[in-house]
Image (cartoon, helix red, strand yellow):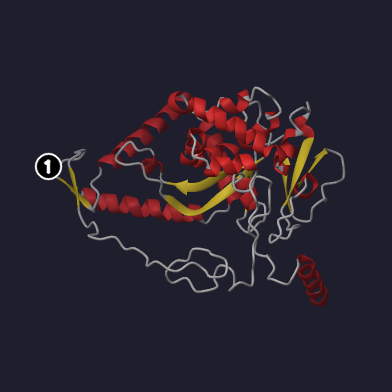
Amino acid sequence: MTDEQRHVMREQNNQRKSDSYARLTPEQRNNRRARDRARYASMPDEQRQLKRDQMNRRNSARRRTLDPNCIYANATHGSTNVIYQNLPGSTHLLKTQPDCRHCGAKRFEYEPPGFCCMNGKVKLQMPEPPEELRRLYSGEDIQSQHFMENIRYFNSHFSFTTMYCDYDKNLASARDGVYTFKAHGQMYHNIHSFGNGGNEPSHLQLYFYDDDPSLSHRFRRARDEIYRERDISIIRCLVHILRDNPYSETFRSLGQVEDVDEYRIVLNMDYKLDQRTYNRPLTSEVAAVWVEGNDINKHFDRSITLFGNNNNYYSIRPSDGCYDPLSYPLFFPRAELGWHSDIPREGIDLSQISTTRQRNADNAG
């Protein structure tokens, strides 16, 4: 069997494994990873070292294998003198389309009219950002420029969720060629329970300590050298901006308790607010906190419960109203309700929808 045939068979086998893995639910993936970690931890030191050597040899061979879409100038494995073939001679660009005349949304080629707002039947209200955040977005000073150039970093720093997907680690390592992020299957935003088992706080756990004036828990995550001083300045500003965020208020309330393992947080996944009006939500509308033994765990009809005594991840669906404010707090600094599938049309309010659904459910029952 030639090297090229081996490469093709290996890629086909990897693709089958990837497809099978992509069909798993987030909970099944977490269970599989937990089993793999437990199996690896239980191995003797010699077997663990053998496993690492096998993985290193496999990765090394994969980097040296001839790709069917390229040739090596001297026809030897490991050569860096590569001539790529079958590259497209031109780039396909979608034709420019006029913005929606009803809501002003940008439209793509082949996207039908009315796809964004049903030809004006659905009208949204954009929330007004706090003045300090508006300055960061639109200012021309050094701080604003640094914020806009690194907005992904700052949003990730303050996000209540973590992004998860199955991706190709060899391409993303940038050890060979250009860094490439290649994801397989669906991307998820997961929220993590706040029990850290003594580890360094991260994501939503960072909000526990935001009442500390030193903010050392966040500054430790600032980037080094060139960016550190500017990062610290913006982090301090964003902590102040997000103090009125209901999710931030909820998690900060746990920062002073000693028995955090006994606490539970219920996050509201229902649509209590009309997304067209953006009434500012209250803490009691988006989250409930209770100590073990209290009987308020049914506070919300649809909810996610976070625990203080585990490290579980919970997936949030993109159709949930809290998906946007939890994942992109710099776009929804007051935890305004994000997009959801039940946004009513113009002239219809949420109470009418609830009444109709209840009547349909009663008739079906």
- 238 in relation to 277, above or below: above
- 157 in relation to 321, above or below: above
Q: Identify which residue, 269 or 285, lies in the foreground.
A: 285
Tell me if mark 1 has few (under 14), some (14-19) or many (20+) residues whose alpha carbon lies within 10 angstroms of its own.
Answer: few
Q: Amino acid at mark 1?
A: Asn
Q: Is residue 159 visible?
A: no
The residue wearing badge 1 is 74
Residue 20: % across, % down: 48, 55
Which quadrant would residue 62 be assigned to in this image? top left
Identity of the residue drawn at 47% across and 66% down: 107
- 237 in relation to 10, above or below: above
Identity of the residue drawn at 39% across and 66% down: 96
Identity of the residue drawn at 49% across and 63% down: 106
Q: Is residue 18 visible?
A: yes
Which quadrant would residue 235 be assigned to in this image? top right
Seen in the image, is 207 located left or right of residue 29? right
Identity of the residue drawn at 72% across and 40% down: 244
Residue 237: % across, % down: 61, 33
Secondary structure at badge 1 equals loop
